[in-house]
Image (cartoon, grey):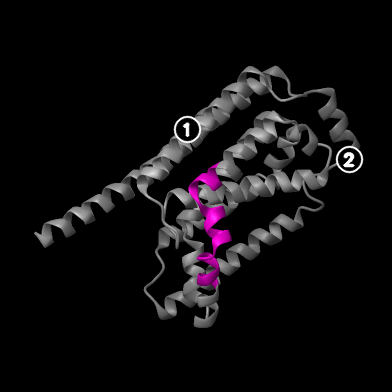
Amino acid sequence: MTNHHMSHSQSGTIELFPSIFIPVIITAAAFALYLYATLSSNKRFQRWPMYRYGCFIIGVLSSASAVTGPLADWAHLDFRAHMLGHLLLGMLGPLLIVLSSPVALALRTMEVHWARSVTRLLKSKPVLWISHPITAATLNIGGLWLIYGAGLYSAMQHNMLIHILVHFHVFVAGYLFTASLIYTDLAPHRTSYNLRSFVMIIAFAGHGILSKLIYAEPPEGIPQAQGLTGGLLMYYGGDLIDLVLIFIFWLQWYRSSQSLFSKFSMTR
């Protein structure tokens, strides 16, 4: 552990959040809203699939563990824990939450006029821009390069606002990126499989290259041993989650091609 981290811990100049209760309350509220939405939806539509409950619960808990609790405290002192938190907050949590289809569930729960308003918003140009695979990938992977390659990691250890904004960005960018590649939730703007596969390859390569650079030269103030392990976690842990994402993507592509083939055969 570096002297920077030791003095940082002793002085208590910055905590992950002002209070543990804030993320706990947000997590509890998310669970309550999702449960209420599913109960309301089940009264009017087909029952909400059980696996989506599990995806949402595990996804929210994964994301929350990166910003509160023992892992968050440890991450403030140890880069290896920080990188584990990155995988949970920016990759695994968003993937599972996307699989739980929260947008589709929300629209099923809303009154018709509210649902139409939300649908119009989802079809708007700003949402189209930010949810496009290229934009989402740039925000996601580009943000990580700024964090670890432009001094943001060091800055977030000294400034509460930067710390919160960085964690917020990592989660939102991870969610947008995942949702832009696999359409398990409502997606008014759909891009081709070819474009999404290209973006996926470039994004995964960018993530892998960054993890190798961290392995070779950790961010300022990080001990070499922690940098080595953190780089390995980012590389292999990221690959493991990426494999799940790739599997879902290619499964959707296969089913889509089978559907198109069936329609073509029927028209002959």
Residue 46 or residue 128, whichever sits in front: 128
Q: Residues within 10 Å of mark 2 (few under 14, many from 20)?
A: few
List the single residue furthest toward the right: 11
Tell me the kind of residue under disc 1: Asp
**Upstream in sequence: badge 1 or badge 2:** 2
Q: Main secondary structure of the magenta part?
A: helix
Judge whether 266 appears above or below 75 on screen: below
Residue 84 screen position, x and y as percent: 61, 35
Mark sitting on residue 253: none
Q: Does the magenta stretch include residue 114?
A: no
Direction from residue 135 to residue 182 in the image, left or right: left
Judge whether 75 appears above or below 225 on screen: below
From this viewpoint, is residue 88 visible? no
Residue 79 screen position, x and y as percent: 69, 29
Residue 146 or residue 154, whichever sits in front: 146
The residue indicated by pointer 1 is 239
Label 1 vs label 2, nearer the camera: 1
The residue indicated by pointer 2 is 13
Which secondary structure, mark 1?
helix
- Magenta highlight range: 118-137
Residue 211 or residue 143, whichever sits in front: 143
Quarter of the picture holding the N terminus: top right
Q: How many marks?
A: 2
User: What separation in Å lies between label 1 and label 2 (alpha carbons)?
Assistant: 35 Å
Residue that appears at 54% across and 51% down = 176
Residue that appears at 50% across and 71% down = 119
Quarter of the picture holding the C terminus: bottom left
Quick check: marks 1 and 2 in contact, CB under 8 Å? no
